[in-house]
Image (cartoon, rainbow, N blue to C red):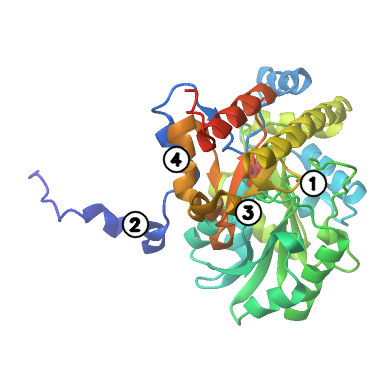
Amino acid sequence: MEEPKHHGKRWMDKFLDSTLLKIPESPISELARRAAAYKDVISLGRGEPDFNLPDFVKEAMIKAIIEDKSHYVATGTIESLNDAIAKKLRGENKIPVEANDVVVGAGSSPVLQAIIGGITNPGEEIILTDPTYLMYAPMIRSLNAECRFVPVNEDNNFAPTCEDIKKQVTKKTKAIMINTPANPMGVVYDKKHLEEIAKAAVDEGLLIISDEIYEKIVYEGEKHVSIASLNGMSDYVITVNGFSKSYAMTGLRVGYAAGPTELMKYFFNFNYFGHICPAVPSLYAALECMTNQKSKDFVAMQIREYDKRRKFIVSRLNEIGFTTRMPKGAFYAFSNVSGLGKRGKDTVKLAHEILDRTHVITTPGSAFGPHGEGYIRFSYATKYEDIEEAMGRIENFLGKNPPVI
Ligand SMILES: Cc1ncc(COP(=O)(O)O)c(C=O)c1O
């Protein structure tokens, strides 16, 4: 065969979905890639628990492997896990669902994709808060749907009002996606905030996708409330959750969603066609988290540790000049950098400067939406001593002393 001719430089681009071409690299991966050039890097960037799996979960997984639980599960899950999840949602979250209303996938991310892909035709819209978790918008766009943004602000606990939401609704709007406890803002929506969102959804006939992945990571007696538990709301809400954060098993990839039966079966298909089932030993690890009493202690231990770091980082950040409210949930401090003068005007530049001068990775607020500009997110899912060291380096960088690197 003759060697095929090249068709110009952009030859490969013609195969790509034009929407994908427009989605930029995530600022988190960009910073992480650049950080690889430095030694002694401390990451306050990633939303990744630094705890390891407890032994009893590891043992459950090893047992599954030894017992040859390494084949496809045709139902996309193991039934006992769906039973346990449905029981938890009914008991802890007060959401009336049955085991067959639960879709399990390889992390909450692919399950979210199945939901978005399952409810939107090309060009249809999902409402997001601005700022919000930075994966939602690219995920929505990569599925050829569109985003509508509701600006939210610190003074209203970063929660949208019913009126704010209604202003963004068009004929093409299908749903509103919320996240509480929230990444990156660290806020927890109370019943009043949720009622505003619920009212907008009911008045406008929208679905609510409620990402509750940080539900267990709350402080000072704060209570997580599931919007699906509000009076009459369960038909409007798809609740999304997973094991990555509460049980520190980001790499095992198990997440789930639950909601109205009529919708869930289509999301199940979308999910199944995409990846059949998660890694089966991971499903057994997740089942162990749900059924072994020891997992309560494991979760409580993590919250105690996060709480110590939270208090420390917030107090240090405020000393250094990053105005930071005490987060009530998740493991992020979302600092207002307007006090840093000129430096606080462009947070991408500031995050790169912090990286280059102190070897500390942070996340610029603008990565979470235009209204995130003016903020820097510091993850405290990192060892206490590393947070101490990072704060010292940043203080030196901002102060008169040269950085100690
Ligand atoms: C709000 C939110 N939702 C979902 C995820 C992804 O979770 P999973 O590991 O279950 O895909 C993250 C991870 O950072 C997150 O912050």
Quadrant in which residue 56 is drawn? top right
Which residue was labeled with disc 2? 16
Q: What amino acid type is highlighted by mark number 2?
A: Leu
Q: Which of 203/305 is in front?
A: 305
Of mark 1 and mark 3, the one earlier in the sequence is 3
**Which label sits in the foreground, 1 or 3?**
1
Which residue was labeled with disc 3? 112
- Looking at the rendering, in which quadrant would you find the N terminus? top left
Residue 236 spot, x, y in % from top left: 78, 68
* Mark 3 in CB contact with mark 4 (< 8 angstroms): no
What secondary structure is marked by label 2?
loop
**Which label sits in the foreground, 1 or 4?**
4
Rounded to the nearest whole Å, what is the CA distance between mark 1 and mark 3? 25 Å
Crowding at dot 2, Cα within 10 Å, few <14 / some 14-19 / many 20+, comes out as few
Quadrant in which residue 128 is drawn? bottom right
Residue 283 spot, x, y in % from top left: 70, 34
The mark found on residue 353 in the picture is 4
Of mark 1 and mark 4, the one earlier in the sequence is 1
5 relative to 379 in the view: left or right:
left
Of mark 4 and mark 2, the one earlier in the sequence is 2
Residue 318 spot, x, y in % from top left: 69, 42
Specify whether tag 3 is near ligand 1 (CB below 8 Å).
Answer: yes
1 relative to 260 in the view: left or right:
left
Which residue was labeled with disc 1? 328
* Mark 2 in CB contact with mark 1 (< 8 angstroms): no
Rounded to the nearest whole Å, what is the CA distance between mark 2 and mark 3? 22 Å
Of mark 3 and mark 4, the one earlier in the sequence is 3
Quadrant in which residue 165 is drawn? bottom right
Q: What amino acid type is highlighted by mark number 1?
A: Lys
Q: Is residue 361 above or below residue 363?
A: above
Q: What amino acid type is highlighted by mark number 4?
A: Glu
